[in-house]
Image (cartoon, rainbow, N blue to C red):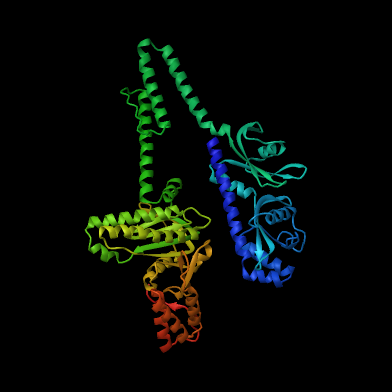
Amino acid sequence: MEADLAVTARAFERLLDDRNRSLAEKARFLSSDHAYRQIYGFGGRQDLETVSRNHQRRIGADLMVLLNFSGEALANTLEPGSATAPAAVRRLLEKALNSDTGEARDIALVGSVPYQLVAVPLYAPDPVAMVVLGFGVDLALAEGLKRDTNNTEIALLFDQGAAASVLVACTLDAARCAALQARDAHANGVLDVAGEPYLTSVLRLGGGADGGLALLQRSVDAELADYYALRNRLLTIFAISLVLALVAAAGFSRLVTRPVSLLVQGVRRITAGDYTARVELAQRDELGQLADSFNHMSEGLAERDRVRNLLGKVVSPQIADELMNRRIELGGEELEATILFSDVRDFTRISESLAPQQVISLLNDYLTEMNAIIEAHHGVVDKYIGDAIMALYGAPLPHVDSAGNALRSALDMLDAMDGINAMRRQRGDVEIEIGIGINTGTVVAGNMGSMSRLNYTVLGDAVNLASRLEGLCKFYGVPIIAASATVIAAEDIVYRELDRVRVKGRSEPVTLVQPLRSLPPEQATFEQALTAYRARSWQEAYDAFAGLQRDVDDALYAVYAERCHQFMQRPPAADWDGAFLFEQK
C-alpha cells in the first residue's frame, strides 16, 4: 500500500508539473504575441478583457488576469471590469518580481476556489505587465488521478485565513468526506476516517498562507480483503481436514491430509504466479475432482498468460490491453488522433538485389528500431504493411500532446536512419531512405473485420490524408511532410511551410509543412519567394527560386522554379488561391 501511495504521489507531482509547464508555455506564447502586445499598448480595458477571454478559451485555462506591476488588474476573466486583482494573484506578482527569472508559480485560493497559477511577464519589448494563467484544482482533477492510480482516494484541503481547512474536493463518499473535513490535523500514517482505517500520505500544495494539502489514501480493509478471504478459505479447509482426521481412523489420515496439503501447496504456487502448478491425485472421490478442477484452472490461467504475451508481440501492448480488458465487439468510436505513415523508398528495387533472408533481416532491424522510437513517444504501431509502418498517437489511449509526440517521433526516426545507414555502409550494403507523412484529425477507432478475425485500427479521411502526405515526400524531395493541423496542435515544433495543395477527393486546400530540428539559413529568402509566387509575381518568384536552386541542394526550390516557369507561359485562372492541384492519389 505504501508503494501504491508513493506511485500516486509521484503521479500527482508529475501531473502538477505537466500542468505548470503547459501553463508557463502558453503564458510565454501569449506574452510574446504581437497582437496582444499591440492591444495592451493601444487598447482599453474592455479590449484587453475581450482578447483575454478569447485567449483563455483558446488555450483551455480556467482564469486569466493581466495586471501591472503595481498590482492593478488590467483584465480579469473572473471579475470583468474590476481593477482589484485577487490577493493570491497579487502575492504571485510579488513573488515573480522577486525571482531571478521574472516568473512564478503557486497553488492558492482565488476567492474560495483553488487554482494552479503561473505568472509570466508581458514584454513590449521590456516587461510592462504580468500575465497570470490558472487551472482549477478541483474534483475532476482528483477523480482523474484516482482513475489513473488504481483507485487511490484523493482529498484536497485548503486554508482560509484563520478559519479551519476547507475540503474543496474528495473522492470518498459523503460521510467519509465530512469526517475528513471535521479533523483538526492530518499526518502521514493510518488515519481513522468514519470508523475505517486508511493509510494516508500528505502532500503540501502551494507555499502561501492559503496553501493546501493533498491527502492520498488507500483503505486498509479493502487492500486486505483478498488476503482475509483467502485466509478464511484456507482456515475452512484446514478445519474440515482436522475434523475428518480426528473422526477417521489412523489408516485414513494420510489419505485425507496428503491431498489437502498438495492442494494448499498448489494454491500457494498459483498465488505466487506459477501457473505450471499441478496436483496429481489418483483417487476418484471429491478431493480427486477438486484436484482436476484445480488443474483445469491453472491450465486456463497459463493459457491466458500465453495469449496475452503472444498478443503483445503481434500488436502494440496498448492495443493488446484494449482487446484483453474490453468486451470484443465490432465497431468503433470517434476520437481525435494523429496518424503517422512511413515507408522505405525504392524498397522493391533494394529487395530485388538481396536474398529473402537478407530482406527479412533488413526489415526486422529497421522495424525494431522504428518501433522503439514510436513507443518512446507514446505512439502505438497499428500495423506493418511490408516495409511501411502505420502508427497512432492518441488512440487507443489519449495523450496531452499526441501531435507533438508524432512529430518528435518522425524527427527521431530520421536521426536513427543516420545510424542505420552508417552500419550499412560499413558492411558494404546500400543505404536506405524513408518518407514520413503525418496528419491530425477525427477518426473512427475500434475493432474492424469480422467476429472470427478482427483488427483494432482507425479509419477516416484523416488517415487517408496522412498516407497521401507520405507519398508526396518524394515529389517535394523532403523526408517528412505534415499537415498544418498537426503542427498547430503540437508544442515547440520548428517547421517550414512547403506548399498549399488540393489532393484528389478533397475540395479544401491543405497546407503542407516540413518539421525540422532548425530552419535552414535561406529560410527568409524562401519565404519572400513564396510570397511573390502567391502574389502571382511569376518572374520575381522564378528568379528567387532559381537562385535558391543554384545555391542550395534542395529539390523543393526546383519544384517551385519549374512551376513558376509553367505559370509564366500558362497563368492559372483568375480565382486561383495559391493551392496546387494533385490529380493522382
Looking at the image, residue 246 sits to the left or right of residue 181; the answer is: left
Which residue is found at the position 23% from the left and 64% from the top? Answer: 352
Using the rendered image of the protein, determine whether residue 449 is visible from the camera's viewpoint: no
Figure quadrant of the C terminus: bottom left
The image quadrant of residue 127 is bottom right
Task: List the single residue furthest toward the front.
Answer: 100
From the viewer's perspective, tell me whether residue 476 is left or right of residue 33.
left
- The one nearer the camera, 255 or 187, is 187
The residue lying toward the viewer, choosing from 290 and 380, is 380
Q: Position of residue 368 (x, y in %)?
A: 35, 53
Nearer to me, 296 or 420: 420
Q: Where is residue 69 drawn, in percent x and y?
A: 73, 61
Reply above or below: 164 against 318: above
- Left or right: residue 229 versus residue 370 is right
How many numbered marks does the figure carry? 0
Residue placed at 39% from the left, 21% from the top? 261
Q: Quadrant of the N terminus?
A: top right
The residue sitting at 53% across, 63% down in the picture is 489
- Residue 448 image offset from top left, x and y in percent: 40, 56
* Residue 179 versus residue 497 in the image, above or below: above
Q: Is residue 315 visible?
A: yes
Q: Quadrant of residue 199?
A: top right
Which residue is most to the top?
A: 250
* Percent of width and height locating residue 321: 44, 47
